[in-house]
Amino acid sequence: MSVANKIRWGVLATGGIATRFVNDLKNVPDAEVVAVGSRTAETAVAFQEAHGIPRAHGSWAELAHDPDVDIIYIATPHSHHHAAGLVCLHAGKPLLVEKAFTLDLAQAQDLVTVARERQLFLMEAMWTRTLPSILRMLELIADGAIGQVTSIHAGFGLGIDFDPSHRLRNPQLGGGALLDLGVYPIHFTQLLLGSPTHVHSWAHLHPEGTDARTGIVLGFANGEVATLYCGVGGDIRSATVVGTKGRFEFTNGFHNAAGFTLHRNGSEPETITTEPSSLHFQAAEAGRCLRAGLTESPLVPLSSTLSVMHTLDAVRAQIGVVY
């Protein structure tokens, strides 16, 4: 598509992640939010006024058909990504869709099929994969800093639980630890090791049927292993990438890392520091792809999104979570 001057973003939904996206987008010089859309005019206008956005739309369709919007960021709960995505794609709009991409693989494949048929840009908002820290880690791996990666150990847990009325306890909204938190260690692992050949998982469920704590073991074709965790009620945000010649350690968050420690076998640890994390990196990547005429991002390709959704489906089937 042809993009002149600044890339004009529309934001679909008005929750906390939408607010964070709008604020972080200010760090992208050639981008601006020009419209917000919600299911009611009242919430759209409230968000518009709070953030100084030029236009507010009282429906998804109105936003999708706004001729002055170049790309839309979908920030709804997981349960609405598929429906909102179809509305926007059928209106001819490129998309950045919040993670987890959809509720399941079938919905994800549906969006990908429509986007490819219409030759529209589509990207999952897995912002971790666009961060300078993660890109630097990939460079070091390519340079042989830790040798061949043999195992990954990662966990993302929040030190609080949620009230039964909260979205994360509601299966109809795709609640639970897996789609909100578990998607991070799975994406992180599959970025480095590809699609697993074996998936083994177990979980403790909330009374509502969503997962409170889930453990996952992934096996890969060349013998690599990953042990992963996601949950509420215990704070952990760490990851270790083990190789034949060393390891990387992310101790203060791997999903939003501004650096990590490189341990080369037999050498003193090296502290790697990069720019602070922000959602603007994924927006900048989406904008770069639009200007280049790409229909998907090489940093977050649709094949990886579909592979992760396949893994998430396998985990859900094993732990008994149904949306």
Image: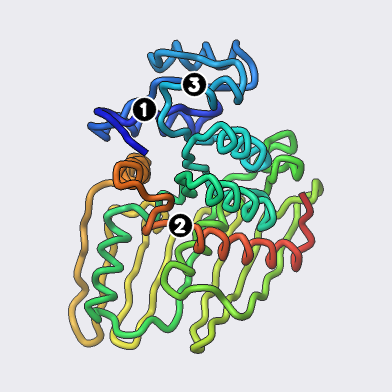
Mark 3 or mark 1: which comes first in sequence? 1
Mark 1 or mark 2: which comes first in sequence? 1
Q: Tell me the residue at 21%/87% (across/down).
A: 266
The relative height of residue 210 versus residue 244 in the rendered view (above or below) is above
Nearest to viewer (mark 3 / mark 2)? 3
Q: Amino acid at mark 1?
A: Arg
Q: Which residue is mark 2?
A: 237
Q: Which residue is mark 1?
A: 8
Decide which of 115, 226 is in the foreground and name it. Answer: 115
User: What's the CA distance linking mark 3 and mark 2?
Assistant: 39 Å
Q: Amino acid at mark 3?
A: Asp
Q: Pinpoint residue 20: horizontal percent, then vertical percent.
A: 42, 32
Taking the image as drawn, is residue 208 in sight?
yes
Decide which of 1, 290 is in the foreground and name it. Answer: 1
Q: Which residue is mark 3?
A: 66
Question: What colouring method underlies this structural image?
Answer: rainbow
For label 1, count other residues whose C-alpha is less than 10 Å away and answer few (under 14), some (14-19) or many (20+).
some
User: What's the CA distance linking mark 3 and mark 1?
Assistant: 11 Å
Nearest to viewer (mark 3 / mark 1)? 3
The relative height of residue 49 versus residue 264 in the rendered view (above or below) is above
